[in-house]
Amino acid sequence: MAPAYNIAMVCDFFFPQPGGIESHIYQLSTKLIDRGHKVIIITHAYEGRTGVRYLTNGLKVYHVPFMVIYRSATFPAVLSFFPIFRNIVLRERIDIVHGHASLSSLCHEAILHARTMGLRTVYTDHSLFGFADAASILANKLLKFSLSDVDHVICVSHTCKENTVLRASLDPLMVSVIPNAVVAENFKPLSGPATSSISAGAGGQSFGHHHGPPPARQLGPHDTITIVVISRLFYNKGTDLLTAAIPRILENHPNTRFIIAGSGPKSIDLEQMIEQNVLQDRVEMLGPIRHEEVRDVMVRGHIYLHPSLTEAFGTVIVEAASCGLYVVCTQVGGIPEVLPSHMTVFAKPEEDDLVAATGKAIAALRANKVRTELFHEQVKNMYSWTNVALRTERVYNGISGAISEAEFYSYDAASAVAAASWTANRGRSGVQSFALIDRLKRYYGCGIWAGKLFCLVVIVDYLLFLFLELWYPRDKIDICPDWPRKKVKQQQQQQRKES
C-alpha cells in the first residue's frame, strides 16, 4: 500500500479562469484526494476570489494576493512569496510541492522555496516553446534554473517531453510522459446512450433514452453543418489563421455556419472580419464561456476546428471528440498523439491547407462516412483521470523513496542499466540531495554568468529561510485540521459492487 502524501499544487492558472491547465490541476487533485492523499492548491487572487476557498471533494485553494501582469501570470516577486509560502506549507504539513506551467511565476518560485525548505518537488510542463526569439530564450533560461534542482518532471505528450528536455538540458530519464484526460461523462453527445429528453441547442429536437450503440447521425446534402471553435483568442491559438479561413470556408460551402466561443485580444479581428464580409447570420460569437458550458456549445456542432499554431496536448479536442464532433486540427506539437486518425483531419498550420482540410471533413460528414456517434465510448476507454492520478502517484512514490530506484526509473533491462549509470554519475541515491553545496553545484552549471547569478539567488533564498525560522518559529504556526481522508480500499470495494 502506497503512503498517503500531503501535496501542494502551485500555479498561477486556476479556476475561475477556464482552460486546459486549470482543468488538469483540478481533475488531477480531486482524483488524488480519492486515492487518499491530501491536496491543496496555491494560486493568485482572482476577481471575487480571495483568501481560502473550499471546492468540491474537500479541495482547499489558497488565493495569494499578488499582482497579475499578463495573461493571469503574476509579477515574478521571487523572495516576497517565501513568507506566505512557508506559512501555508507548514500549516498544511506539505510533503510534495507540484508546480505547473512554465509561464507561471508562482510555480517556479514555489519549486525554489520548497527545495530550500527540504521538500520534494515535481514540475509538470503543459506547453511548447521555441528557441530563437528573445522571449523564448529568456523563458528557457529561467526554466533551466527551476529544473536544475527539481526531483522529477512530467510532460503531457512525447513532443512536449522532447521540447522540455532540450529547453532545460534535462536527462530524459528524469522526465515522464503522463497525458491529460477528460471526464467523458461531462462530454456526452446529444444522442448518447445515457441521455434522456435533452433538447438540441440549435434544432430543438428531443432524443429519447437509448440502449446499446447510439443511432448514426444522418446528414442530408442540404442540411446545415455547424463548425465549433472554442479557444482563447490569442496569436498562438491560430486566431489569425481562423480569421482568414472562415470567409473562404463559408464561401465554398453554402450550408455551413460557425459558432465561436472564447475571448482574447484577437476577438476584435474576428469581429471586423464578420462585419467586412457581412457574415453576422453565419458566424455566432459567444464571447467567454465557463468550462461547464463547453459541452452545451459543442453539441450544437458537427465539426470542431482547432487552428492552434503550437500545442503540447490539446485537451479541448478530446472533449470535442467525446461530444461526437469530427475534429479538424493543425498538425503541430503533441496534437497528432492525442486522437486516432479516424476522428481527425489534419492540416498544416497554413490558411489554404486549413480550408482544404475543413472541406474534406464537411464532405466526409455529408457522405456519412464518419461514425461520430461512436466517438464518445472510444474516448471514454482511451482517457481516464484515475489513470493519470495513478501514474502521478507513482512519480511521488519514486521521488520519496517509497519504491526502489530501479523500479521507478526502469521498465526493461536496458533502461535499468541506463538508470543505474545515470544515478551513479549524479552521485545520489535515487533522489536529489538537499545539501546547499550540492544544490549550488547544480545551479552553477547553468551558464557562465547565469550560473553565478542563480547561485546568488539560492544563497539569498537560504538566508531568508534561516531568518524566517528565527523570526517566526514553526511552533507559532497553527496546524490546519485535515479534511477526512478517503479510504481507498473501501472505495474500490464500492466500485466493484457498483460494477
Image: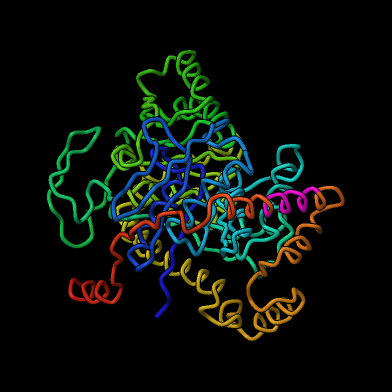
Q: Residue at x 67, y 83 (%)?
A: 414
486 lies left or right of 308: left
Above or below, 464 against 282 in this view is below
Give the image quarter of residue 17: top left
Camera sees residue 119: yes
| Front-most of residues 262 and 40 | 40
Q: Residue furthest bottom?
A: 413
Q: Position of residue 272 (x, y in %)?
A: 50, 16
| Front-most of residues 426 and 177 | 426
Q: Residue at x 23, y 60 (%)?
A: 213
| Front-most of residues 208 and 361 | 208
Give the main secondary structure of the magenta stretch. Answer: helix
Q: Position of residue 418 (x, y in %)?
A: 70, 79
Check the image and tell me how it is coloured. Answer: rainbow
Quadrant containing the C terminus in the rendered view: bottom left
Above or below, 384 against 493 in this view is above
Q: Position of residue 422 (x, y in %)?
A: 72, 76
296 lies left or right of 2: left
Residue stretch in magenta: 453-462
Count the marks: how many? 0
Residue 66: within the magenta?
Answer: no
Q: Residue furthest right?
A: 448
Give the image quarter of residue 439: bottom right
Camera sees residue 335: no
Q: Position of residue 315 (x, y in %)?
A: 45, 50
Q: Residue at x 64, y 76 (%)?
A: 430
Quadrant containing the N terminus in the rendered view: bottom left
Q: Residue at x 43, y 41 (%)?
A: 63
Residue 460: within the magenta?
Answer: yes
